[in-house]
Amino acid sequence: MLVSMVYIILMRWLAGIIIYFTILALYGLLGVGTFYCFWYWKQLEGVEGSDQALQFTTNLLSYLRLRTTWLIFGCVLGALLLILLITTLCLCNRIRLAIALIKEASRAVGHMFSTLFWPIFPFILEVIVVCIWVAIAVFVSTSYSSKFTVVDAPTDFNLTNGTDCTPADFNATYPDTTARCQFSEWALPSYTVYLQFYNLFMLFWLVNFVIALGQMTLAGAFASYYWAFTKPHDIPAFPVFYSFLRSVRYHLGSLAFGSLIIAIIQLIRVILEYIESKLKGKADNKVVMYILKCMKCFFWLLEKVMKFINKNAYILIAIYGKNFCTSSQEAFWLLLRNILRVAVVNKLTDFVILLGKLSVTAVVGIASFFYFTDKITFVSSILAVPAVTYYWTPIVVS
């Protein structure tokens, strides 16, 4: 947590350096790679067997002895270098905008440290929801009922062996017969499948509701920072807490409706998976399987799009206080008008966050390794190293 906080604060000054260094490193790698491929292609000129045509083989090293292979590598890397150069020149202003946004976000987090601890609360709520879902699913799965069937029915009687029956009704209806209503097995009622689907649907709905609540709470907190005229004096004392109260008091309906849409799409995807599993191994269903795969792809894409629109709709709701439908429409057209800017900013932000995750993980992992292997003497003199049988376990966990 401490390392993550330090990294987020340093983003105020390091975001531009990291992005520009990465772009220059890509230029260098692609340039060196292109030069090396064409240079090696020239070196193989006149070498015996290097001018053979490409043929399929399991020996991958044989491809590296052919000039055609290095020519293809060089052309591909050169094309990537040209694409990167054109993209950088066309998106230069948007790259600067992304860097400015990352720096401003770091500055906002520096004034509102509670935003770093807020994700713990939605996580606890999600764990509670999952535990309730598991408990209900177990209860439903074990709700067996006793099944009775008719046995020893006479051939000249209006009864058939193996048909279901109820002991009380059977004995009252057929008192004078050798046939018996006998217990056969414990069976799940047919409606348990529908109960499990309903339980799963409620899991999707509640989990998405918790996620939406977390997104709107953070959006409201950062909105209070954005609209503060004098920072940090005009920022509320507890921005995350007050934003949470506003979300719960005024916007529960919007959160429920937005999460309901996602839950319905996810349930449809599960139903499609269930249908596909039932059809597997059966003959003459290639057309049906193709249609199912197309539908699965469509609903997967629809879920991604709706999640993205919903997240931006929650931001507008937190800022302006409008209802979900109006905010979704405004968010959609706002994204459509700035689609290129949104794509660049989002991808660069994701890249910087990924670098942050990798850096924090590497720092903590290396520090844990040196600590548990007693390599840092000044730390071990202050804090005793615990005796562990396999020191990789605490390192991986940390």
Image (tube, grey):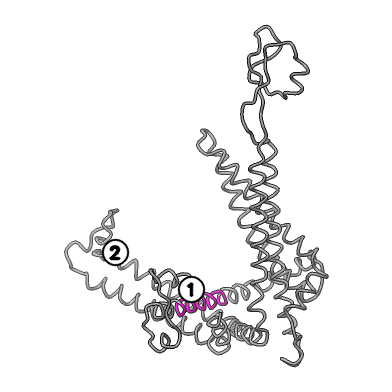
Q: Nearer the viewer, residue 99 or 175?
A: 175
Badge 1 local density, few (<14 within 10 Å), some, or many (20+)? few
Quarter of the image holding residue 148? Answer: top right
Badge 2 local density, few (<14 within 10 Å), some, or many (20+)? some
Q: Which residue is mark 1?
A: 398
Q: Residue at x 64, y 57 (%)?
A: 131
Kind of residue at badge 1: Ser
Residue 362, magenta (yes or no): yes
Horizontally, residue 8 falls left or right of residue 35, namely right
Residue 345, magenta (yes or no): no
Quarter of the image holding residue 141? Answer: top right
Report the residue that reaches farthest toward the left.
Answer: 48
Marked residue nearer the N-terminal end (1 or 2) = 2
Residue 346, compared with residue 132, is above or below; it is: below
Q: Which residue is mark 2?
A: 68
Horizontally, residue 216 falls left or right of residue 64, namely right
Provide residue 268's location: percent of width, then percent of height.
Answer: 66, 49
Q: Main secondary structure of the magenta part?
A: helix
Q: Nearer the viewer, residue 342 or 257?
A: 257
Where are the magenta residues, as a range?
Answer: 348-364
Q: Residue at x 53, y 87 (%)?
A: 14
Distance in Å between CA atoms under marks 1 and 2 = 48 Å
Provide residue 232's location: percent of width, then percent of height.
Answer: 72, 91
Q: Nearer the viewer, residue 245 or 255?
A: 245
